[in-house]
Amino acid sequence: MFCLCVYEKDLYFQAMSLVPAFFHHLSEVLYQVLECVGVNPWVVERRRHTFLQREAAWDVEAHQDRRDMTTFHFGSQSEGTTTPGLQSDTDVLYTLNDINIMFSWADWQRGMWNLLMVREEDTPPQHYLLQLIRPDIPQPVPHYYHPDWVTDSQGRVFYSNMAVVRGWAARCGDRHMRHGPSNSFSEDWDFVTAFNCKCLPSEIMSWFTRIQHGNWPSQETLQAARRCGCFLVPVGHHGSVNQEIEWRITPNLIERLLMFSLNIVPIKCLVVLKMLKKQEFVKYIHCENCKFTTFQCKTALFFTLNRTPPTLWIKHRLVECIVRCLQTILEFLNQGIYPHFIVEGVDLFDGKLCRECQLRLEKAIQGMIQDDMHVLFHLQSDDLGQRLMAHPGNDVNAGICGRLVKDMFQHYLIHERQACNRLCNNREADVITSLNNEINILESLSADARTTQYDNNYIKFVVRYLTSVKASVTSSSCIQSGDPLPQDIWQLYGESLNTDVASSKLKLASMHYCQGELQRAASVLSEVEFDLDDSVQPVCGCGRQPYKDDLSKAFCEYTVQNDSHEQMTKKLAFCVRFLREEKFCAPRFLWCEMYRDVGDDVDHRDFNEHQWMDWAEVDARPFLLYLQYLTYRGLGVRNRQLEAFHGLKDIVISRDKLHQLYHPETVLNLSGHCWELEGDVQGALHVYNTSLRNRPRNNAANWHKQRLEMMLNH
């Protein structure tokens, strides 16, 4: 157990008793500046709500897919301890619930794969080996017969943490990245696959007796922490001979509980520590593979909160709180050991920061404190230093809120893309049955007493979306066979029209157009046109990001005032998606988007593209204009037809507008079709070539170009 001596105790308390007079004023200004860049109670709560809602979406989708797993968001984004300037990544942890983790033989369960937690004399702190135990009888698996299992000299079979790494590497290919226990395909995301431990091991349980009581955390928080489980994550100790079969124990749920118990002052303090780490601390860490981490900042905050009275953590003492945290870091740098706040026996410097870098960083932090924290005026993240000198400046809270809403619904759509992908593996005759089964499962889950409000928000969204697909698939089958639409089809369309402001209504209008009911189509299109104003934000689940991913000021301000799901969807326009099973509800020209591959194009699709490129997807606003062009052409209303045509041309000739689209090549192709219908074949050919320059492969423009060139040659 580490000795947490106070660093230069007499000097420390002497310094803190002589707090510079201007610290109070600086604290007030810093407090307000941080409010304006998104570190305030309202935005913190919205961040937490958003990421808890995203967790629910993961879990419901796993339930739909019959996977026994639970998803958690941890880290800065979900805690609300970040700003736009910090550019924090998103941390996701999956737990595999069909594996039983055993602390002892009494924990064995029949019918499940069991893993017994084993520690040897030389096993590093915070790490365990996982021995495989048979599912039929409580006995060890007797010998090695699987590439993910490792047999030791005693004949014991252990599960390798490299199984997770190999799985991610196979999925991500050249884009695979590994950082500690996390695997990813992007610097913006960290995914951790973990096993759930329902009970806390001794090195965590001892925290409840070691922790200093009286300041923070409260007794209520500690009682709740005792009920938290923990996780085993796939990473070994950096210097261990058994590195590939060690798993690290981590109390993420307790840490999140502690963070959620904080008021806004410690959160602001932690954000400033992260800014200092990112800009200042890094200047003094020159050794390769050495780093000071965000987790170490959080740990310093925890220790400081535990040691100091609640009267410190108030608005006009914010700078003093930051100095106290820096003094805690100095203490650990001085003693050369950085203890974990919860897990006994762990040194956070081990494998992270060499002694030489520790001493350089210690001297630098001492200089910051001795200089009365003037370093704050030089912080560049979110223009914090400039804002301090000029006072608060512009408020960016609306932009943060708008981004949270957009990203949350994009998250929803990605999950529903995966659900539709599962459905499309069936024959068309089975799709309706599969849709009904999915909807019934979701509705029964919604009725379960254990289902949270977060779950129900997502379930309601999913049911509406799947109902829209069901209505369209049913209509497509009837149009194909020439049968009249069933009477209940209008109820299905009615139940699905509020998925968002445009996509379901556009599919209804498209169905009317394909049935030849042009006046009905025009009526629905007029309603969409009225609602689709400049405050509406496009969102898509295709996995792409537009080159210019700007949010309108009107949309962001709307999300500040309206935080329910029902209200949010009134300002969102999802891309319009037609499965192949819905194609008779789509204009025939759009069918080509469902068969866009030429030659070996399929081999050049990424993971996301494999899931949707056999469908037609198009941005809502351009599809509205395209449907208006076709509909008013059929009705003989030339002025409205030309108005729609010019609207499409305005999009495709504007680089900015084209760069805001999720599917620019498809929009260019629809625009080219309008040029064809106007009789301008050369103009159409130019548009198709532009589409191909934008995306040479997996683009239906290849077919259109070939068709026009053959026509011109004859």
Image (tube, grey):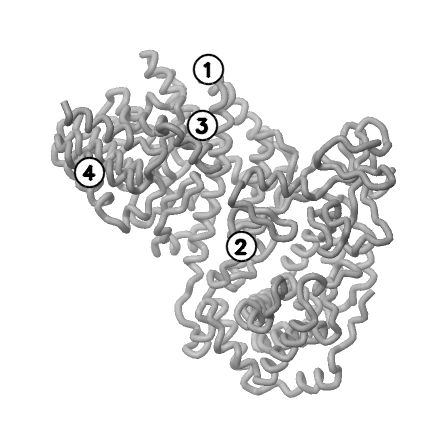
- Relative to 317, residue 101 above or below: above
| Mark 3 and mark 2: Cα distance apart in space | 34 Å
Q: Earlier in the sequence, mark 1 or mark 4?
A: 1
Q: 10 left or right of 397?
A: right
Q: Earlier in the sequence, mark 1 or mark 2?
A: 2
- Relative to 592, residue 271 above or below: below
| Mark 4 and mark 3: Cα distance apart in space | 39 Å
The percent coordinates of residue 97 (x first, y second) are 69, 37
Question: Which residue does the image show at 40% across and 28% down from the upper left?
Answer: 614
| Mark 1 and mark 2: Cα distance apart in space | 43 Å
Q: Earlier in the sequence, mark 3 or mark 2?
A: 2
Q: Which residue is mark 3?
A: 467
The percent coordinates of residue 243 (x first, y second) are 73, 50
What's under tag 2, amino acid-wise?
Asp
Question: Which residue does the image show at 79% across and 36% down from the upper left?
Answer: 132
Of badges 1 and 3, the one in the foreground is 1
Residue 686, numbered circle:
4
Q: Secondary structure at mark 3?
A: helix
Q: Which residue is mark 1?
A: 429
The percent coordinates of residue 26 (x first, y second) are 52, 80
| Mark 1 and mark 4: Cα distance apart in space | 41 Å
| Mark 2 and mark 4: Cα distance apart in space | 41 Å
Q: Which residue is mark 2?
A: 89
